[in-house]
Amino acid sequence: MADGLTHVLVAYALATLLSIRYPWITARLATVAMVGGMLPDLNRLKWVVPPETIEAALGASFSWRPMHSIGGVAVAICIASLTVRAEYRRAVALLLALGALSHFALDLLLVPPAGTYQYLWPLTDADVVFPGFYSSRDRWVAPVSIVLALAARSVARRHSRSPERESPESPMPADG
């Protein structure tokens, strides 16, 4: 898999570039997208808290595997967005989803079998397989993501210095 740094930096680059078009995406909210970039990897908590431990505590079957799927991430996004103030919930949910979707997109580009997961659970248990673009052992992926993040930051800073840029008054525009 692309390492955690790559997932975080790609999510940062996307959020930073989107902040040019959507001024409600502040630097703090770009950080939320970075957290979203790591949400699917919550399935790795199995190494810290084995499923058997949770099964014993709950008295029910448990698996961390669904965390690396659209369904598992959607549940995590809903829970996380409820932990912030009401005016930030929608923004937090959108940016967590942006980060998680960028994570899935990067993982889909992995050469199989590393790029095969049940991404669409609970809709289907089928593994989604793409031809693959890079291997999880490739070293060029992290430097490319660093360059992308630095380029996005440079573009956003250059744009923020332009005189037509307005400062946002609220976290997100009102619905309607």
Image (cartoon, helix red, strand yellow):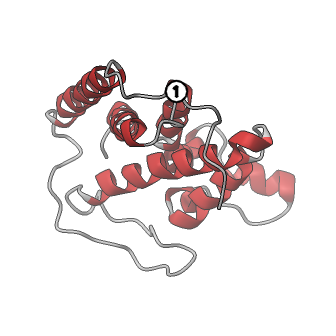
Left or right: residue 140 versus residue 159 is left
Towards the viewer: 172 or 140: 172
Residue at 31%, 22% (x, y): give it. Answer: 162
Towards the viewer: 162 or 30: 162
Disc 1 marks a residue whose amino acid type is Ser
Residue at 77%, 40% (x, y): give it. Answer: 83
Left or right: residue 112 versus residue 161 is left
Left or right: residue 114 versus residue 111 is right
Check disc 1 and report its element: helix, strand or loop. loop
Across and down, in percent, residue 156 comes to: 32, 27
Residue at 51%, 63% (x, y): give it. Answer: 69
Residue labelled with disc 1 = 167
Q: Return the residue found at the far front.
A: 164
Across and down, in percent, residue 154 comes to: 25, 22
Residue at 63%, 37% (x, y): give it. Answer: 171
Across and down, in percent, residue 19 comes to: 42, 36
In the image, residue 108 above or below residue 4 = below
Which image quadrant for residue 146? top left
Which image quadrant for residue 73? bottom right
Towards the viewer: 173 or 108: 173
> How many numbered marks are there?
1
In the image, residue 174 above or below residue 139 = below
Q: Quadrant for the C terminus, please.
A: bottom right
Towards the viewer: 13 or 125: 13
- CA neighbours of label 1 inside 10 A, class few (<14), some (14 to 19), many (20+): few
